[in-house]
Image (cartoon, grey):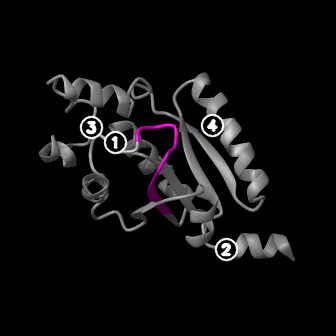
Amino acid sequence: MRIIAVLNMKKIAVYPGTFDPVTKGHEAMILRALPLFDHIVVAIGHNSAKPQAGYFTLDVRLEMLKRVFAGVDKVSVESYEGLTTDFCKKSDAHFILRGLRSSTDFEYERNIAQANNALEPGIETLFMISSPGLSAINSSIVRDIHRHGGDVRQFVPEAIYSFL
């Protein structure tokens, strides 16, 4: 009976991150994942290992993501505090989507996925490998280039140029 219930459930994934700022890598990952899910919630969460105040405010990051995915009906953008698994339950999501750029990412993400699975066995973490040519892009590098006056347009979606 459980198998039938699982097959009939709506496939909702949460793609958590700080998105400070959203990059072309984030955008590509979400667009590639769309055929796998009925809905993807792009969720800006607080990561205790990263600075409290982001480079861009939470409101700006939310607006950036909403602009990037404007017109994509299967994507919504939200923010949350606390455990990602709790946010997944609140969102009726049974999947956490994470991107991997390198083996270092895998080691880090695997540990989080195993902890999440221990907390909520009904929520599965799915890993997708980054698109070729985008694996070197991350928000930290984009922030550093931007902070020092460099042109980051090649690393971020066109929809957020006005924020830069």
Disc 4 crowd, CA 10 A, few/some/many (<14, 14-19, 20+) = some
Measured in 3D between alpha carbons, the distance from the residue under mark 4 to the one under mark 1, in whole angstroms, is: 19 Å
Q: Quadrant of residue 1?
A: bottom right
The image quadrant where one finds the C terminus is top left
Task: Say whether disc 4 or disc 3 marks the residue closer to the N-terminus.
Answer: 4
The residue carrying mark 4 is 109
Tell which tag, 1 or 2, sits nearer the viewer: 1
Task: Say whether disc 3 or disc 2 marks the residue closer to the N-terminus.
Answer: 2
Q: Magenta segment, which residues?
A: 40-51
The residue carrying mark 1 is 20
Disc 3 crowd, CA 10 A, few/some/many (<14, 14-19, 20+) = many
Instruction: Residue 24: give x, y in percent of width and height.
Output: 33, 38
The amino acid on which the numbered mark 3 sits, given as a three-letter code, is Val
The disc label shown at residue 156, or none = 3
Considering every residue shown, the one lying at the far front of the view is 52
Measured in 3D between alpha carbons, the distance from the residue under mark 4 to the one under mark 2, in whole angstroms, is: 26 Å
The amino acid on which the numbered mark 1 sits, given as a three-letter code, is Asp
Q: Tell me: 78 left or right of 144.
A: right
Disc 1 crowd, CA 10 A, few/some/many (<14, 14-19, 20+) = many
The disc label shown at residue 88, or none = none
The amino acid on which the numbered mark 4 sits, given as a three-letter code, is Glu
- Residue drawn 26% across the image and 45% down it: 56
